[in-house]
Every structure is written in structure tokens, then in C-alpha cells.
Amino acid sequence: RTLSRVSDVFFALAGANTDDVIEAIERDISPKLAAHFSSIYLDTALFGRVDTLFRARTALGLTAEQDRVLERYHLAFRRAGAHLDQAARARLAAISERLATLGTSFSQNILADERDYTLELNGEADLAGLPEFVRAAARNAAEERGMAGKAVVTLSRSSVEPFLQFSSRRDLREKVFRAFIARGDEGGAFDNKAIIAEIVKLRAERARLLGYETFAKFRLDDSMAKTPQAVRGLLDQVWTRARARAFDERDALQKLVQEEGGNFPLAPWDWRYYAEKLRKRLHDVDEATVKPYLQLDRVIDAAFDTASRLFGLSFERRKDITAWHPDVRVWEVKGPDGRHAGLFFGDYFARPSKHSGAWMSTLRDQEKLTGDVRPLVLNIMNFNKAADGKPVLLSYDDARTLFHEFGHGLHGLLSDVTYPMVSGTSVLTDWVELPSQLYEHWFERPEVLRRFALHYETGEPMPEAMLKRLLKARNFNMGWATVEYVASALIDLEYHSLTESDTLDVTDFEKKEMARIGMPEEIVMRHRPPHFGHVFSGGGYAAAYYSYMWSEVLDSDAFSAFEETGDIFDPATARKLRDHVYAAGGSRDPETLYMAFRGRLPTPDALLKRRGLADLAPAGDA
């Protein structure tokens, strides 16, 4: 228990505020921790005791949660290989240790590439087209890197994407885009391709030792999806429609290029720039006009208020509690009865010491095994800081990301289980994104935006006409967004459908897979393999990146439960949602929990409808 607490704190620091010392410790301790946990889960005597209890469980008078915990522990021992002979167990332990080392190296290489790169913007010519909020973020990024008075683009997504949206300098867009997609793929000390090849081979070997043909089959055997075929079925159904939409979007953007006198075919670094122009033309909405209404502090208030209206939670800022960086904010969370429910830590701003992306984690999980232990929950973001004295303004996507990660946070804060093994987000990977993606729905509702989308200068709410245009444009560019995601999910599945005997050239494999699925050449997948941290920085989403789409099937249907009542804060539905989703953790099988909440299992129809893809036919060659 002490080791778990210490490691939770250490790895939170390693992700959010690392330095050379922490990185060296991480490289040293990761394989040692893997070896330690292997020594537990490969202990045949301990497994024998668990197995005896498991076989007799129907006679033990267990609660439903105890039965689930025993089942999960028994499965964990078997999936570790405790039932195998000594030689196989020794090899599996060695594989785990090596994978821990490789995953740490992969993650640190990405951070090193991101940390080393800046594109300096010199003078008005380099700043052409950039609105003031992008310029201010570029000046702030330069100041953080000891370049006061200058302006730079970094490889943080929150720096790259606005630059690609607004910069009228096509040559600079290309430079930034190429650097962004080349993270971990530049050759030299920080190149990740050899690491990927070894990780894939070791995972395939582990699967074979455990009796599976591929790692994908091993991984998905313990999931809601169950099989690679089920995953491909969902992804292919979405892919064909999204690809058709993306080709239509491409043609519209190419037409706009030509209308503006561009004598070039649309390239990946052009897509966001011309899409922003087209969105403005079609919907009279663009990021520059929306962003002043999305102040970070007001979006946080909106997330908290939604939790209050749904679940009765309250949030009190605790400035007396310090954390790992002065930017980190801490709130005490109280339940409907006014009692302490946990602490919530918000670390919202990008910095060189922080890994890119957005995530939720915990310093301590909720449990009742040793008393009423309340959770310590973190949300980590990478938003751009504003200039001194100015409010931080978010893009629409960033605001939605804040709601997404806070949905994960609520999964930890509302957890109400006895055993830490099934606390909070300790659930199957294709279930874990349901609470987060479901929470995004409330951000996109007029009932929430009317109250919290207030102009940072005037305090006026977003005009009703603008709000309607914004929500009407929600599915604009959805073909592109879906294609870039699904392509990443498909290549993840294909990597892990290889056997250990397959020879893997990472660059060649990517090219062949993109050709096989018919990837539009104007779009690059959201996460190219050399920086695909979800899959290669650890095992969390290996053969499981599809989980976001699988959970979207669930969340699209789940939110309909509120819409059907006519009240998106309906108390009875919210109570069922809390009891069977947010509070239940992994205490029961996900299908059982969803049935208890919704009364039935969903189909992909709600997902396709929400993404505006329901009526599209599959795309042919284009």
C-alpha cells in the first residue's frame, strides 16, 4: 500500500513536472517496479491460494463487489502467467521488466523532442494572420524558455493547432506541421522506431506464452469488445462513412484554395487553415470570435456547476494547500451532505517540464478497506498561459477537453467502493472513457453555455444567434476529425495483430497500413506511431485505442437518457448515473452496470447520428 502511494505521487510528478533527476529515477525504478509486481503475480503459491478461493467462491457468502474483486485478482494472476511452468514465468517477468524500460524511454524521447524545438517568429511577416491570443501565447512561450521579447511556436498541441488554424504563412505552417508529426521520428538519440519494433515483438511473445495468437486477442479477451473482429467491425463501420465525409470536406477546401488564388493541391498543413476560413463562411463562426467567451475560470466553474446540479457536489478553493508547481490549483470537494469527499488538483498550463496531452490520475484512490479513504484526484492539461493580468481563453476543443478530463475526475471523486482494486477508473479500458466522454455532452448544451460563456471584457453572455450557429456547426469538419482518430485506432490494432515472427519496419508498416485503409493523403493520423504515447509509453491503450470510439457508442446513448426526460439534469436519471457509472468503479461487469443505468445495451446508431455520419454511404477511391 505504501509503495502504491509513493509510486502514484512519483509518476504524477514524472508526467507533470519532471526534470533530469526525476527522469533518471524513472528510468531506474520503472523496471524494478515491473520486476516487483511480476514477483507477486507470478508467485505460484500465492496464486494457488487465490485459485482455491476462486473455485469455492459460490460457497463463501461474498458480496457482489467481493466476488468481482476475487474474479479480477484470479484473472490478473492468470493473465500474468502464474499458472505456467517456471521457464515461461521467468521469461514473462523478463518481458515485463524490459517493456517498462522501453515505455519509459519512449515517453522521455517524445518530451525531449518537444522540449528541444521552437520556431521563432521574427517580425510581423512571421506573425501574419495570427490573432492576438495566439501572438500572446507565443510571446509567453518564449518568455518561459528564457527568450523574453520574442515569440515562438512550440510542439505543444495547444501551440501548434492555433498556429495551423490562423497563420497565413504557408511555409511556416509546413515547418511546424512537419516538426509536430515527426516527434520521435527524427533519427538520433530520441528516435522511437526501434523501441516500437521491440515493444511490438515482446508483446506478441507475451501473448504467445499465454496461449494467444496475437497480443490484440490477448488484450481484447479482457474487454467489453472481446475480440479484434468486434473492434474492426465498429471501426470499419465508422471509417467508411467518415472517409466519405472527409473527401467531401477536402473537395470544398480545395475549391476555397483555388478561389483565393492558390495554385497548389491541399496539403495536411493547409487543412486547419482553410477549414477555419470555410467554417467562418458557412456558419459565421470562427475560433477568434468564440474564444473570448470561453475563459478558463468560467469553464472550470461550468464543469463544477454541472457536477453540483447532477450530483450535489460543491467545490471550495484551498489556497493553503500547495502542490508540485505554483500554477496548480486545489479544491476541496464536498458531497451533498456537506461532508469531505476528496481533493481536486487542476494543473492547466503547458510548460517545458510537463508531458504533452491531457490526462487524469490520482495521488490516492477512494476505498473503505482501511476506513473511509477519500480520493486525491488530478487533472493535467497543456493550455497556453495568457499575458500577465489577462484571462486565459480556451478554444472550443480545449474547453471540451476540460470537461472530458473532469469527467474522469468525477469517476475518481464519486467512487464508492470498498476495495482499491476496483476504485474509480480501475475499470476495463473500453468502459473508462464513458464517464469522461459523457460529461462532454453537458458542455455542448445551451443551458450551460448561456450561463458560463461570458465575454472576458464585457461580461455579456454569448449572443443567442452566435450560440445557435456554434452548436449548429458542431459537426463541421467531422469527417477529418473522425478519420484522423480512426486511422490511429486501426494502426494500433494492426500492430498488435502481428506475431513475434513478423519482421517489423515501423516506417514501412505505417505506409502500407495507410495505403490499405485508403487514408486520404491530405490527412495525417492523430497520433503517428513514433509519438503514440497512449500505446507505446505504457500498456494502457495498447490494442485499445479504439476505446474512445467504443465508449462513444455508450455515451451517445447514455446522454439520450437525459434528453428523453426533457431535462438534462433530471434528478432520477442523474442518481442512476451516479450509482451505476460514476460511483461503481469496477465493482461489477460493465454490461451489468450499463444495463442497470439504461435498461438496455446501445447500438452504434446514436454515435453515427451524433457525428453526422448516419446517412452517409461508404466512400470509394478518390
Image: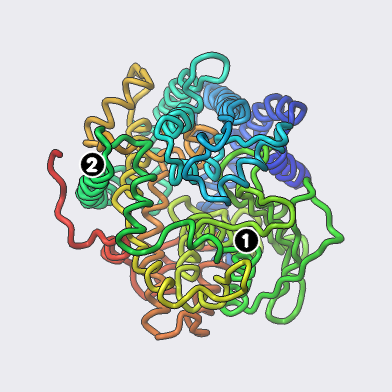
Q: Is residue 402 left or right of residue 169?
A: right
Residue 123, horizontal then vertical, whole percent: 57, 34
Vertical comparison of 305 with 227: above or below = below
Q: Nearer the viewer, residue 82 or 60?
A: 82
For image coordinates 42% across by 68% down, the residue present is: 594
Residue at the top extreme of this rendering: 188
Report whether residue 416 is seen.
Answer: no
Query: In the rendering, which numbered label is found on residue 258?
Result: 2
Name the front one of labels 1 and 2: 2
For image coordinates 36% across by 18% down, the residue present is: 505
Which element type, helix, strand or loop, lies under badge 1? helix
Which element type, helix, strand or loop, lies under badge 2? helix
Classify the position of the C terminus by image quarter: top left
Q: Residues within 10 Å of mark 1 (few under 14, many from 20)?
A: some
Residue at the right extreme of this rendering: 320
Vertical comparison of 152 with 66: above or below = above
Report whether residue 392 is seen.
Answer: yes
Vertical comparison of 276 with 533: above or below = below
Residue 402 appears in which quarter of the rendering?
A: bottom right
The residue under label 1 is 296
Residue at the front extreme of this rendering: 124
Going by the numbered disc 2, the residue's amino acid type is Gln
Residue 367, horizontal then vertical, whole percent: 69, 61
Q: Nearer the viewer, residue 311 or 600?
A: 311
